[in-house]
Image: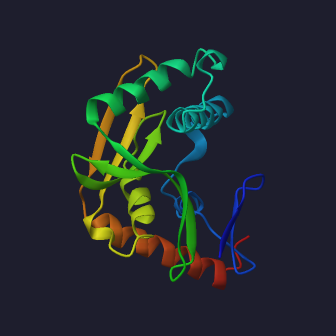
Amino acid sequence: MLTFDPEKHEYWYEGRIIPSVTQILQAEGFIDTAFYDDWSRDRGKYAHKATELYDLDDLDEESLDPEISPRLEAWKRFLSESGFQIVAIEEQVSNISLRYAGTLDRRGFLSGKRAILDIKTGAVEPWAGIQLAGYGMTAPDYYGIERYAVQLKDDGKYKLTQFKDMNDFGIWRAAVSCYHWKNNNLKRR
């Protein structure tokens, strides 16, 4: 059974820590964290929480930081204009055979098709397609799932980016394999 420790941001399966999608992407050099400062990380965390609480109908919008409010407005606009139907919110997912886990921002239906979404508050980087392939591969029939990033902008607008490159799945599988090989043979800590 998969468990998650939110304080340490660790995923556990049968008493062992397994890496997250983001940890693998960072360790294998896909994500350059030099561009992220504390505020951008916090902004992303707060915007994610605001959209989660909004989707759960449990958000006090008056309590939002002025930096987060426009991003919530962008999320509302996306939901209204796209008709995205939410099935799961901040869903912890795993692929035990490949030994990784993660938290999928949203799973649902977009234009009547199964879709997974990652919410971004900064630029949508090319590695997001690989990230979403990793999340997608936690489902047994992942080839039929469409992958999107929704960038929530500070002007209350959003940008929806679809990732269609099927090579993302092979790249993800290779990244996971390299991660585990290095961890087992190079004693990476």
Residue sitting farthest toward the front: 57
Most foreground residue, 20 or 81? 81
Q: State the image quarter where residue 41 is shown.
A: top right
Quadrant for the C terminus, please.
Answer: bottom right
On the rendered structure, is 113 left or right of 45?
A: left
Most foreground residue, 70 or 173? 70
Residue ID at (36%, 49%): 126
On the rendered structure, is 92 left or right of 14?
A: left
Q: How many marks?
A: 0
Q: Position of residue 169 (x, y in %)?
A: 34, 69
Residue ID at (28%, 67%): 167
Residue ID at (58%, 18%): 67
- The vertical placement of 138 against 114, above or below, is below
Residue ID at (70%, 81%): 14
Q: Position of residue 137 (x, y in %)?
A: 41, 70
- Coloring applied to the structure: rainbow
- The vertical placement of 42 against 148, above or below, is above
Quadrant for the N terminus, please.
Answer: bottom right
On the rendered structure, is 19 left or right of 108?
A: right
On the rendered structure, is 12 left or right of 167?
A: right
- The vertical placement of 184 against 94, above or below, is below
Most foreground residue, 27 or 61? 61
Q: Position of residue 109 (x, y in %)?
A: 31, 50
